[in-house]
Amino acid sequence: MPRLTLVVPVYNVQAYLPECLESVLDQDFTDIEVIAVDDCSPDRSGAVLDEFAARDERLRVIHLTENVGLGRARNAGLEQATGDYVLFLDSDDTLAPGSLRAIADRLAATDDPDVLVYDYERTYWDGEAKRNQKAELLRTEGTADVFSLADRPELLDLLQIVWNKAYRRAFVEDAGLTFPPGYYEDAPWTFGALISAERITVLDRVCVRYRQRREGGNILSTVSRKHFDAFDQYDRIFAFLDSSPAYDRWRGPVFARMVNQYLTILEKPGRLPQDAKAEFFRRAAADYRSRLPQGFTPPAGARGHKYALLARGNYAALAGATLAAKARAAVKRKAKVTVRRSLRGALGAYYQAQLRAPLDPNLAVFSAYWSRSVACNPAAIDAELARLAPHVRRVWTVQAEHVDQVPAGTDFVRVGSREYWSVMARATYFVNNVNFPDSVVKREGQVHVQTHHGTPLKSMGLDQHKYPASTSMDFKRLLERCDRWDYSLSSNRFSTAIWERVYPCSYTSLETGYPRNDVLVNATRDDVVRARAALGLADGVRAFLYMPTHREYQSGFTPRLDLARLADQLGPDTVLLVRGHYFYAGSSELAQLQADGRIVDVSRHPKVEELYLASDCLITDYSSAMFDYANLDRPVVIYADDWETYSVVRGTYFDLLEEPPGAVATTQEELTEILSSDRWQDAAATELRARFRLRFCEFDDGRAAERTVRRVFLGESDAQLPPVVPLSERTPAQVPVPQH
């Protein structure tokens, strides 16, 4: 029998669940069991639970066959609990390090009380943390270690939540505590536990980190009539008080909590639909009159005035006071917006006028890499849109200095031009692999598709908070840009979970695969031959494509290899194709090496996918190219001479040296030996690549662009989209072996 059982209900939290489970299973107190209840979650949360359970026998998983809601999911876990004490943890929250040890020590020091109350802090997307505002109620100095609620009734003033307490399991069973269905299921349990308990203690320590999800993950912040559930919950609470005369003393405090909660639901934006507020007020007023305890004294001040309005049933007066407060807030907001726009001065009268014109339902705007080129996922979607919906006009935004690189026949506008502001104001669809500028206003009815431009190895989005040396990003502005997204594309579940966590906005993840990789999966032998011929690669010549990534601590492109020496050692039958990162301008060193015939500089080649098709092997360090190239099922060699520095400065999501797509070298000598021998393509490298492809090439089956167009532009449901072809059934084209 473990000392502590933690019950973790799980629903739609794949982005946060690993962090939650790690915070529990990595605690230094190990005498625990964890019962995770998959409440028929539609995302990958259930699979994440199973993966963790396979690694740690202390975690047991219950998979419910239908969604039953938070309360009943907790009940399912509670039924399986065997620990002396039961704790609850929501699956997007975490435990602070050392919390379970501190809880266990406090329980032992106070001779196993019925309930232990501990503290929490609210954590925000920007890294800020705020401790519970009523933390002083958990003080221990000068107070009894163990007491009843009658000794410290102020504990009822704490937020009525279940996950800041440890409950003796035998006490829970004797008291008959279970969770009711509904939105406000914590209240009946919490009131019942604290009032029933004979022995309570406190722990003045933050144990739970309560995540404040920016995208509105808290169901209590959802506009819905389900907030009427509060009435049912207080019916249950007062029925509990009616069950024993000993509980009469708590009618006043519980009544005050009830009234405050009703007023909060009425007054807070984002709770009740507008047409439901008057009805809610009438029911709240009826509860006020029927449950008003004899001798109850309302609070003083403005809150007391609202109590009086409830007592009299005067909804008009309460609504008027609320509207006046909203009006004052709106004036302040408008003033701030006016000041911000006057300072920015970027929109211009023409754009403002265009924003008032109707949207064009058959206009789509495309951009890639900050309007540098026609490329990547947006270009693949553009081509498929032309095939499936030719009536939609497709326009690219291009920086003036890059217009010479626009393919012939492509409709484009120069960024900042009059035509640019017109299409930005009136297009219905927007497709980009980065964000559009801050000056772009998203109108109601416009649809933004964020395609991304790689599977993340390095830290992205909010995770870059942890690596300040790698960025000077304004994270607030970043998320305001991401708020415009309606869809976020993903090529694997690994990426989906990261995008949802590091860009916490209200978009829909589309696990379509990356459209830019369709060409790699669908290419034929003839396509490979043509790609090689275009680069002048003769039959029998081996082509190694070297693609290093950008480094924040490197201002220009300086190859980390002695490319001339490597070319000499590999011999005349091998060609080195070298492609610098697009962040860097042209390299004079590469130009000279090409002039000397030592390498082929392909840094400005317009289609990287053709370079992939033409090459026998990819050599890279930390570039996302490895994830795309793996779709070809051709060898990948990792050259990671500065892994320790890169992983510390930028941060990475997994240890590439431990989970590579192929052979790994950390020195040039080792790389030369790998490429000169058969190690770059031997059985060991093939096995590593197979594992890598299984994890990261999940959805890239050659129909990603089609799925995207059908889902976004044609409005088809997920069930109507082409199913993903299993990895084992894909046969990408290989470099032909010359016939002799």
Image (cartoon, rainbow, N blue to C red):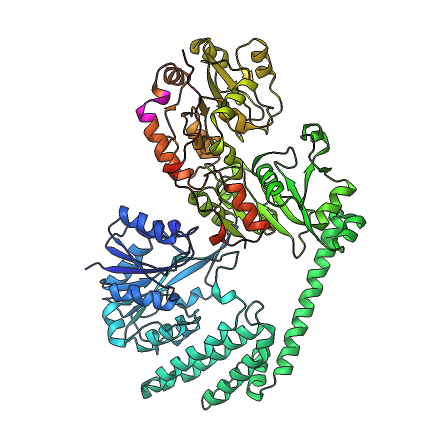
Name the residue nearer the viewer: 555 or 145. 555
Residue pictured at 59% horizontal, 28% vertical: 582
Quadrant for the C terminus in the image: top left
Residue pictured at 35% horizontal, 79% vertical: 150
Residue pictured at 68% horizontal, 54% vertical: 443
Magenta region, main secondary structure = helix
Q: Is residue 332 shown in magenta? A: no
Q: Position of residue 551 (x, y in %)?
A: 52, 29
Indicate left or right for 438 with 181 as reference. right
Residue 437 showing in the rendered view: no
Q: Position of residue 716 (x, y in %)?
A: 54, 53
Q: Which residues are magenta?
A: 680-685
Indicate left or right for 370 with 612 as reference. right
Indicate left or right for 494 with 478 as reference. left
Say which quarter of the image contains residue 166: bottom left
Vertical relation: 294 (above or below) 446: below
Residue pictured at 59% horizontal, 29% vertical: 583
